[in-house]
C-alpha cells in the first residue's frame, strides 16, 4: 500500500496543508465545497491532469489551445474566463498556490445588491467548470451563462437565509366546519404509539348541522403513523359503502395521506389501491386537510377508544359516547 501511495503521489502530488479548513466553512452547496477541495489539491480532471494519465493526447486547453490546461488556466487565463470576469467588472487575481482563498478574501463589489461575494465566487467557479465541460463535450466555445449563475446564487441565498426571530405570530381559530353541501362529512384519524400496542383508529360521520350520524373506533395493528391513518381512512370508506352513507366531504389532519393518493409509495400501494377503489364507489367525494384542532373528535376516538376496547373488533357508535360529549358539543 505504501509503494502504491508513493507512486500515485509522484504523479499527482496532493498539496495537503492545514490551512484549507476554510473550504468547509464556505457558505455554499456541499458539492461546491468538494469541488473547491479538488481545485486546491489540483485534482480536477483537466487536460493537463488527464495527459499525465495517458488518457488524452495533449495537455493543452481544448477551448483555446494556447497553453497547458491547468486549473488556474481554466479559471483565470482562458479567454472564456477572462470574458466572464471582465463582463462583471471583477479584477482577476494573479496565479499563485493560494489564489482561490485570496480571491475569496478580496471581497469584490457586485452590481446585484442581494449577492454576497463570498457566496458568489464559489458558484462562479463551479459554473465556469460546468461551462468548460459543456464546451468540451459539444466542441464549442460558449460563454458562461451569467443570468443562470446569478439566479442559482440568489436561490441558494434566499433558501438558506435564517428566519427572523421577531416574526409576528398570527392567532386564528381552527375548528370543525360542516360540509359545504348536502351529505355527510367523514373525519378520520389514526394513533400510533411506538412504546405500546395501543394503536387505534377513529372515524366520525356528521351532517351539515354538525349532528352525529355514525362513528367507530377500534384497536389496530400497524407499523407506523401513516399506516394507522391509512387504515382509518380505508375502514371509514368501507363503513360508508356498507351503510350506504352519502359522503360529500372527507377531512383529515394527515396531509401525507392526501399526497399518497397521487403518488402511492410501494409500501402501502395495495391499501391505497383499495382506498381509491372505495372512493370511486362513493363518487369521489372531496378530500380536505384540516389542522388537528379541527379533527379533535376523530383524534379522540383514535387515542381513547382503543384504551377502552378489549378486542380488535370495530366498536360501532350510533351516537357519541359520554367521554366525547365535551369535544362534540
Image: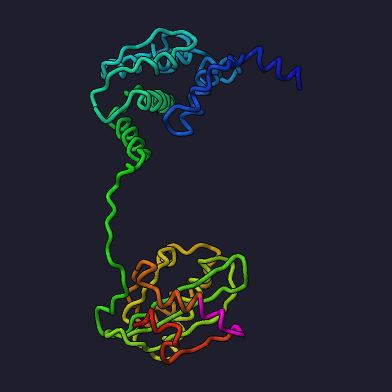
Tell me if 249 is positioned left or right of 14 in this view.
left
Tell me if 325 is positioned left or right of 230 in this view.
left
Residue 139 appears anywhere in the view: no
Query: Vertical placement of 195 versus 120: above or below?
Result: below
**In the image, residue 307 lies in the stretch drawn in magenta:** yes
**In the image, residue 200 lies in the stretch drawn in magenta:** no
Tell me if 142 is positioned left or right of 269 in this view.
left
Query: In which quadrant of the rendered view does residue 252 lie?
Result: bottom left
Q: Residue at x 58, y 14 (%)?
A: 15
Residue 67 appears anywhere in the view: yes
Query: Vertical placement of 119 versus 19: above or below?
Result: below
The percent position of residue 13, horizontal first and vertical second, equals 61, 14
The percent position of residue 157, horizontal first and vertical second, equals 34, 35
Boundaries of the magenta span: 304-312
Q: Which one is nearer the viewer's eye here, 212 or 101?
A: 212
Total marks placed:
0
Query: Vertical placement of 167 versus 63: above or below?
Result: below
The percent position of residue 77, horizontal first and vertical second, equals 39, 11
Q: Residue at x 24, y 27 (%)?
A: 112
Quadrant where the N terminus is found in the figure? top right
Query: Vertical placement of 56 versus 235: above or below?
Result: above
Quadrant where the C terminus is found in the figure? bottom left
- The figure's colour scheme reads rainbow
Q: Which one is nearer the viewer's eye here, 124 or 304?
A: 304
Query: In which quadrant of the rendered view does residue 7 lie?
Result: top right
Tell me if 137 is positioned left or right of 224 in this view.
left
The percent position of residue 165, horizontal first and vertical second, equals 33, 43
Q: Which one is nearer the viewer's eye here, 46 or 150?
A: 150
Amino acid at each position: 500500500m505504501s509503494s502504491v501511495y508513493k507512486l500515485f503521489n509522484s504523479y499527482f502530488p496532493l498539496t495537503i496543508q492545514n490551512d484549507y479548513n476554510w473550504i468547509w466553512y464556505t457558505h455554499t452547496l456541499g458539492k461546491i465545497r468538494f469541488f473547491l477541495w479538488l481545485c486546491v489539491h489540483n485534482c480536477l480532471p483537466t487536460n493537463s491532469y488527464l495527459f499525465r494519465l495517458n488518457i488524452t493526447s495533449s495537455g493543452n486547453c481544448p477551448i483555446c489551445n494556447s497553453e497547458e490546461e491547468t486549473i488556474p488556466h481554466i479559471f483565470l487565463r482562458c479567454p472564456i474566463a477572462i470574458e466572464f470576469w471582465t463582463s462583471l467588472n471583477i479584477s482577476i487575481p494573479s496565479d499563485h498556490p493560494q489564489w482561490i482563498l485570496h480571491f475569496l478574501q478580496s471581497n469584490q463589489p457586485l452590481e446585484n445588491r442581494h449577492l454576497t461575494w463570498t457566496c458568489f465566487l464559489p458558484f462562479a467557479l463551479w459554473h465556469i467548470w460546468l461551462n468548460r465541460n459543456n464546451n468540451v463535450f459539444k466542441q464549442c466555445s460558449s460563454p458562461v451563462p451569467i443570468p443562470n449563475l446569478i439566479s442559482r446564487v440568489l436561490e441558494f441565498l434566499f433558501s438558506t437565509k435564517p428566519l427572523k426571530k421577531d416574526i409576528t405570530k398570527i392567532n386564528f381559530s381552527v375548528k370543525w366546519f360542516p360540509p359545504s353541501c348536502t351529505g355527510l362529512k367523514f373525519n378520520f384519524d389514526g394513533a400510533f404509539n411506538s412504546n405500546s400496542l395501543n394503536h387505534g383508529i377513529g372515524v366520525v360521520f356528521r351532517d351539515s348541522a354538525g349532528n352525529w350520524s355514525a362513528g367507530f373506533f377500534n384497536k389496530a395493528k400497524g407499523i407506523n403513523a401513516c399506516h394507522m391513518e391509512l387504515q382509518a381512512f380505508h375502514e371509514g370508506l368501507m363503513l360508508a359503502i356498507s351503510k350506504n352513507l352519502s359522503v360529500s366531504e372527507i377531512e383529515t389532519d394527515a396531509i401525507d395521506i392526501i399526497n399518497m393518493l397521487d403518488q402511492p409509495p410501494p409500501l402501502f400501494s395495495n391499501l391505497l389501491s383499495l382506498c381509491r377503489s372505495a372512493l370511486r364507489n362513493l363518487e369521489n367525494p372531496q378530500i380536505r386537510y384540516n389542522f388537528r384542532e379541527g379533527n379533535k373528535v376523530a383524534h379522540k376516538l383514535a387515542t381513547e377508544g382503543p384504551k377502552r376496547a378489549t378486542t380488535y373488533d370495530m366498536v360501532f357508535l350510533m351516537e357519541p359516547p359520554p367521554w366525547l360529549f365535551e369535544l362534540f358539543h
